[in-house]
Image: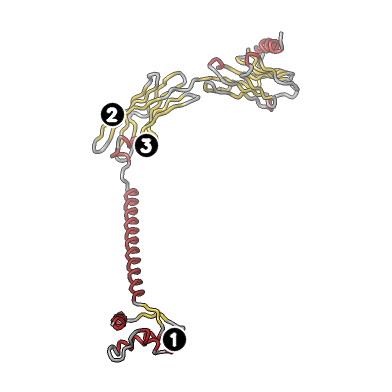
């Protein structure tokens, strides 16, 4: 008889003599998942002979002994991970056959149960579908009739009524037990109709927004929304007026700048004197050219200072006419 078989027989012999065993802790695990089974280290005596984990108090999973490596049963090899540090185990890739009670038992001066878990392995729920059967609207309300159904033909019918302010579900939240441990719900949440299928390990849902079917009653105009809308329009118009005024100002400024440039000349002061001379003496002693006039006033050649000034436009016209004569 191997050590596991011997201990199994030992555990079975004393299991009926156990006193003060704690109530099993319920644990729900999705099929194909893992579960960690732990013991409180403060409850583990310092001088125990061995600590065992069993399934339904008959199948030994693993045995811990002080100073030794844990021994895993051949039947669970590859599916049980043992942690020496805290005498805990992890069950992997669970199936429906793994549903049952897992017990941690320590044997020393006395025998006692350290932890016990009632594990239930469940399949994930099937997907659901929310179907809108009909929509009827009037001037003051909108009614939406829906069907919430699962793939295994379970379903709930419900009607939702929306007015200018709120939406509500007639008859309250619809609930139906689809399968053992699973339920089907249809309800209203934050403006959406929700079809929910759930059990203790998983859930699936489908949802539709009420405003897609009751557009006239989805978002009522409130005083706050009205004020926000008016304020937005005022801000937009103000910005538009400011933009138009800015464009006009820049265009006008550019026009004045061009006019000032056209009426401004940079010349030696003596050139202006010659221009005045041409205006006052247009026929008698007008120099043959502007160049000759400059030469006839040698004092102007030595001047290096020039200034930019604005002169009347009529003066330039007269100078231009005389120069071309």
User: Can residue 158 be seen in this snapshot?
Assistant: no
Mark number, residue 301: 1
In primary-sequence order, the first of circles 2 and 1 is 2
Q: For label 2, count other residues whose C-alpha is less than 10 Å away and answer few (under 14), some (14-19) or many (20+).
A: few
Q: Secondary structure at mark 1?
A: loop
Horizontal placement of 199 versus 58: left or right? Answer: left
Mark number, residue 134: 2
In primary-sequence order, the first of circles 3 and 2 is 2
> Which scheme is used to colour this image of the protein?
secondary structure
| Closer-to-camera residue (292/9) | 292
Q: For label 1, count other residues whose C-alpha is less than 10 Å away and answer few (under 14), some (14-19) or many (20+).
A: few
| Closer-to-camera residue (64/57) | 64
**Residue 101's quadrant in the figure?**
top right
Residue 160 image point, x, y percent: 32, 31
Horizontal placement of 56 versus 64: left or right? Answer: left
The vertical placement of 231 against 169, above or below, is: below
User: Which quadrant of the figure contains the C terminus?
Assistant: bottom left
Q: Secondary structure at mark 3?
A: loop
User: Can residue 252 be seen in this snapshot?
Assistant: yes
Residue 317 image point, x, y percent: 29, 80
The vertical placement of 294 against 56, above or below, is: below
């Amino acid at each position: 008889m191997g050590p596991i078989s011997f201990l199994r027989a030992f555990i079975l012999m004393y299991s009926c003599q156990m006193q003060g065993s704690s109530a099993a802790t319920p644990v729900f695990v999705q099929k194909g998942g893992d579960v960690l089974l732990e013991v409180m280290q403060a409850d583990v005596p310092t001088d125990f002979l061995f600590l065992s984990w069993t399934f339904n108090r008959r199948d030994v999973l693993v045995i811990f002994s002080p100073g030794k490596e844990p021994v895993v049963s051949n039947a669970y090899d590859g599916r049980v991970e043992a942690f020496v540090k805290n005498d805990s185990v992890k069950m992997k890739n669970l199936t429906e056959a793994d549903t049952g009670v897992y017990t941690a038992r320590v044997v020393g001066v006395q025998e006692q149960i350290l932890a016990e878990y009632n594990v239930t392995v469940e399949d994930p729920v099937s997907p659901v579908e929310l179907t809108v059967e009909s929509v009827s609207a009037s001037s003051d309300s909108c009614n939406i009739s829906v069907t919430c159904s699962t793939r295994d033909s379970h379903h709930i019918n419900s009607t939702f009524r929306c007015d200018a302010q709120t939406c509500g579900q007639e008859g309250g939240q619809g609930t139906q037990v689809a399968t053992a441990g699973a339920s089907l719900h249809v309800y209203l949440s934050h403006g959406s109709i929700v079809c929910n299928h759930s059990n203790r390990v998983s859930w699936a849902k489908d949802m539709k927004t009420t405003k897609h079917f009751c557009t006239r009653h989805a978002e009522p105009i409130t005083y706050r929304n009205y004020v926000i809308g008016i304020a937005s329009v005022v801000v937009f118009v103000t910005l538009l007026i400011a933009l138009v005024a800015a464009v006009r100002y820049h265009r006008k400024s550019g026009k004045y700048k061009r006019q000032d440039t056209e009426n401004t000349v940079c010349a030696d002061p003596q050139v202006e004197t010659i221009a005045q001379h041409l205006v006052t003496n247009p026929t008698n002693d007008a120099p043959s050219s502007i160049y000759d006039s400059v030469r006839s006033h040698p004092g102007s050649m030595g001047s290096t200072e020039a200034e930019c000034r604005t002169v009347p436009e009529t003066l330039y016209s007269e100078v231009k006419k005389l120069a071309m004569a």
